Amino acid sequence: MIAEEDVQIVTLIDHKRSSKMYRVRYHLDNNRAECSCKMYEREGIPCRHILWVIKEKGLKYLPATYVKTRWTKAAMSMPMFNLGGNLIEDTTKMEAVKKKVGHLWSEIFTCMALNKAAFKRKCSSLC
């Protein structure tokens, strides 16, 4: 571990993967870390190297900077845009439509089950 002004640099060696080295820069002022594997920058998910440093620092929770909105329930309440930047539809309206469609399918399957039972009773009384 190397300490600079407000940054600590931690070098991790992964012996399971051909002794590959990773450098994690941990910023003391905002509990933010950057890893040389760049997984967080590429995919938006903290890598195991960052998580290890956060655990070693004694933090019990993942800092809020690592929790992207797309992983929360709030993501569905935001409007969606296509690749051209045009608004697709209000997601709250889409959720309401999905609930209605689900309810309709439930009603259809319930009716089909009742009809099947009635059909079996009618056939057994005729035979």
Image (cartoon, grey):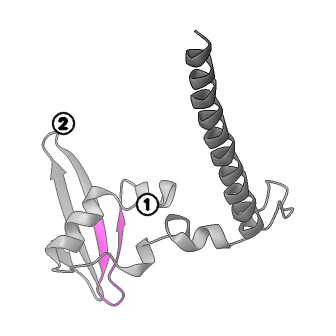
Residue 30 painted magenta? yes
Residue flagged by tag 2: what amino acid is it? Ser
Q: Front-most of 116 and 26?
A: 116
Q: Which residue is mark 1?
A: 40
Q: Front-most of 36 and 40?
A: 40
Residue drawn at point x = 66 percent, y = 54 percent:
103
Mark 1 or mark 2, which is nearer to you? 1
Q: Whole-Å distance between the Cαs marked 1 and 2?
A: 22 Å
| In the rendered image, the vertical position of residue 120 relative to residue 60, given as above or below | above
Chief secondary structure of the magenta span?
strand
Q: Which residue is mark 2?
A: 18
| In the rendered image, the vertical position of residue 28 relative to residue 42, given as above or below | below
Residue flagged by tag 1: what amino acid is it? Tyr
Local crowd size for mark 2, using a 10 Å CA cut-off: few (<14), some (14–19), many (≥20): few
The image position of residue 1, as x and y in percent, is: 15, 71
Magenta stretch in the rendered image: 24-35
Left or right placement of residue 115 versus residue 2 in this view: right
Q: Front-most of 50 and 105?
A: 105
The image position of residue 102, as x and y in percent, is: 66, 51
